[in-house]
Amino acid sequence: MQIPNLRQKKSLANENSIFSITASTKANMHFTKLVPSVFYTDIADGLQLFVDCLQFTIAHKDFTASQPYCVLQKGNISLMLFQDAQLANEHNPELRLVTDNIEEVYTQVAASHPHLLHPNLNKVTLRPWGAKEFAIADKQLGIRFQQW
């Protein structure tokens, strides 16, 4: 499959485009979750962030495997943590968590784990695009909290 050059000015929505899919030829796809994988040099760092700070629970774990991992959940949100130094060095994701109560989330995070507050967005701030945001970061990733 040839990937089109997305920087070209011509329209990609033509009959030869891989993006040209009609409902009559393809069934509608339905997804229920997106579960990201986050890689840590030491999985304990991820557990401190997600379990201790953000109150996720461990739904499944195998810390004795050759590549220790766990599945974390909070409400309808799930993610997987893996201990893999090589992949941790290659991947530094940023996640966004949307909430209806950003002030409460900020108060709890700032009280329990103030060292995780990101220096560039360490207070709830109204952004030009209309979202209230603050951010935290550990050794591996950043999380931006948003309320629209």
Image (cartoon, rainbow, N blue to C red):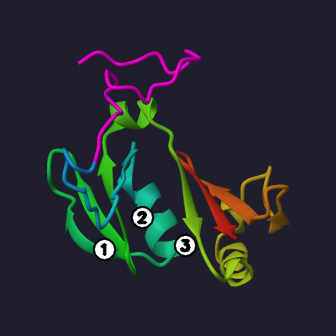
Decide which of 132, 53 is in the foreground and name it. Answer: 132
Question: Where residue 47 is drawn, which disc sits there?
Answer: 2
Which residue is painted at 23% across and 52% down in the image?
68
User: Which amino acid type is marked by label 1?
Assistant: Ile
Q: Which residues are magenta?
A: 1-22
Is residue 5 shown in magenta? Answer: yes
Label 2 near label 1: C-beta < 8 Å?
yes
Mark 1 vs 2, N-terminal side: 2
The local secondary structure at tag 3 comes to helix
Query: Is 124 drawn above or below residue 100 in the view shown?
Result: above
Decide which of 60, 79 is in the foreground and name it. Answer: 79
- Binning the other alpha carbons within 10 Å of mark 2 as few (below 14), some (14 to 19) or many (20 upward) gives many
Decide which of 97, 47 is in the foreground and name it. Answer: 97
Query: Is 32 drawn above or below residue 85 in the view shown?
Result: below
Question: Where residue 58 is drawn, which disc sits there?
Answer: 1
Q: Position of residue 133 (x, y in %)?
A: 74, 64
Left or right: residue 79 versus residue 120 is left
Which residue is painted at 79% across and 52% down in the image?
119
Q: CA distance from mark 1 to mark 3?
A: 13 Å
Q: Position of residue 3 (x, y in %)?
A: 35, 19
| Res 72 → quadrant | bottom left
User: Which amino acid type is marked by label 3?
Assistant: Cys
Q: CA distance from mark 2 to mark 3?
A: 9 Å
Is residue 78 shown in magenta? Answer: no
Q: Position of residue 77 (x, y in %)?
A: 39, 71
Left or right: residue 131 versus residue 23 is right
Picture quarter with the N terminus: top left
Picture quarter with the C terminus: bottom right
> Circle 3 sits on which residue?
53
Q: Residue furthest left?
A: 65
Left or right: residue 34 versus residue 65 is right
